[in-house]
Amino acid sequence: MSLIALVACVPKRDNVNPANSNSTDADRIAALETKVSQLQSKIASLPTSSGNNYDADIDNLQVQIEDLQTQLDDILVEIDDRISVWEKEQEATQEEEEAATNVKWSWDITSNYNENDVMVDYWQTPSRMESENDYTVKVTLKNNIATAITDLILDITYTPNGNPYVDEKNTFMDTISAPYTLWDTEIVTRGDDEYCRRISNMSEKIKLGVGEELQLKLEFILTYK
């Protein structure tokens, strides 16, 4: 296999190095191989029956060939080093991505009324949150005070135990059956890379008559970047 073919066999990479340098490396090797071939042709073309002594010429050409071969070897070592660095970077990136997506979430619902005044009961399916998914949330509310309520606000909060990267445009809470309630989703991030620390879903004001029990059926869509 020629050195050019060897470079061409280097697998493509997502990063700038070493993939995008394959063409440049091949050009460098091709140029050196051409020079080697030219020097070898010069040696072969030296006449053998003229009686002249070409040992010095041949030695000089051989030295040039050896120098070119050293340059070729250096290029291949350079390519191997770049591939090694890239592979380590890929391993680190894969570990980071797995850590960012393989997280468990806890969740809670609170309101602007205490539990004695407004009962809040809730559950979710699937109950375990370990990946991006669409989750069905059911909430039962009951007014336990002697007056009607017109300003009940629910806050459904999700908290990860890791550092996931959440797609803000495609993560939200939605009401999927009457009575329909609007929700405002806020994704709280932290760190230079802005990983998610908390997702807060705030409802609009909900009305509850005296002694009224209300059931909400919601859908929470969690999407990672």
Image (cartoon, grey):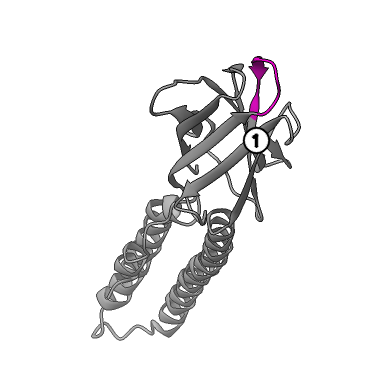
The residue identified by callout 1 is 119
Horizontal side, residue 6 vs residue 179: left or right:
left
Which residue is at the front of the view, 60 or 37? 37
Which residue is at the front of the view, 150 or 83? 150
Above or below residue 56? Residue 191 is above
Above or below residue 125? Residue 140 is above
Report how many numbered discs are placed on residues in the image. 1
Residue 222 visible, this orientation: no
Q: Quadrant of residue 100?
A: bottom right
Which residue is at the front of the view, 116 or 55? 116
The question of residue 169 being in magenta is answered with: no
Identify the residue at image location x=65%, y=31%. 155
Identify the residue at image location x=40%, y=23%. 178
Pick the quarter of the image with the N terminus: bottom left
**Coordinates of residue 91 in the picture (x, y in percent):** 54, 66
Horizontal side, residue 27 vs residue 201: left or right:
left
Identify the residue at image location x=60%, y=30%. 142
**Coordinates of residue 112 in the picture (x, y in percent):** 73, 26
Horizontal side, residue 107 vs residue 13: left or right:
right
Which residue is at the front of the view, 174 or 208? 208
Mark 1 secondary-structure assignment: strand
Residue 88 visible, this orientation: yes
The magenta segment is 144-154
Above or below residue 196? Residue 18 is below
Above or below residue 98? Residue 157 is above
